[in-house]
Amino acid sequence: MFKSLQRFRDKFIEDCANWWKFWSSWLAVFWGVVVTAVWNSPETLGQLVSVLPDELRAYLSPVVLGLVAGLPILVRLLKQQKLVRAIEKGTVTQKESGSV
């Protein structure tokens, strides 16, 4: 049983135990809250969008798509200076922090 658990664990990144330290994780939680709010009150989104002029709505569609799809990727690729400083001080190892 433990070997199968170890094989399952090997499929994750080395620093999966520190998932909460990554900005991308925080951003994913934020997007989850936004989606949940819209899901529970869909008329709110309709009211917000209906206030915008048609031209602005057409312009904002690709911008919103870029933010929702691209921002988590960009955030994950950024160096997190707090983790870099922790590695330099020796309070966190490179393995614990992953690729910062």
Image (tube, rainbow, N blue to C red):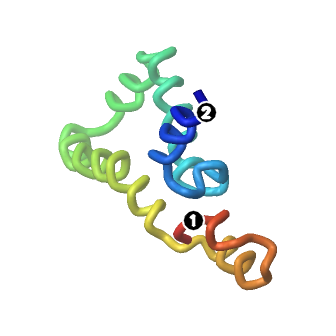
Q: Which residue is at a point 65% across and 49% down the rendered structure image?
A: 17
Q: Which of the 4 image quarters holds residue 65?
A: top left
Real-space Cα separation, disc 2 to disc 1, in angstroms: 24 Å
Q: Which residue is at a point 67% across and 63% down the rendered structure image?
A: 96
Instruction: Identify the disc placed on residue 2.
Output: 2
Q: Which residue is at a point 49% across and 16% down the rendered structure image?
A: 41
From the viewer's perspective, is residue 31 above or below residue 14? above
Q: Percent from the top left, x then y, of residue 48? A: 41, 30
Q: Percent from the top left, x then y, of residue 26? A: 59, 48
Q: Marks 2 and 1: CB-CB under 8 Å?
A: no
- Quadrant location, the N terminus: top right
In the structure shown, which secondary structural element does the residue marked by tag 2 occupy? helix
Q: Percent from the top left, x then y, of residue 69? A: 33, 48
From the viewer's perspective, is residue 75 above or below residue 42? below
Residue type for callout 2: Phe
Would residue 17 appear left or right of 35 to someone viewing this image? right
Q: Which of marks 2 and 1 is nearer the N terminus?
A: 2
Q: Which of the 4 image quarters holds residue 74?
A: bottom left
- Which mark's residue is nearer the viewer, 2 or 1? 2
In the structure shown, which secondary structural element does the residue marked by tag 1 occupy? loop
Q: Which of the 4 image quarters holds residue 5?
A: top right
For disc 1, the marked residue is 98
Residue type for callout 1: Gly
- Quadrant location, the C terminus: bottom right
**Crowdedness near tag 1: few (<14), some (14–19) or many (≥20) residues, C-alpha within 10 Å:** some
Q: Percent from the top left, x then y, of residue 94? A: 63, 73
Q: Which residue is at a point 55% across and 57% down the rendered structure image?
A: 14
- Is 16 in front, or is 85? 16
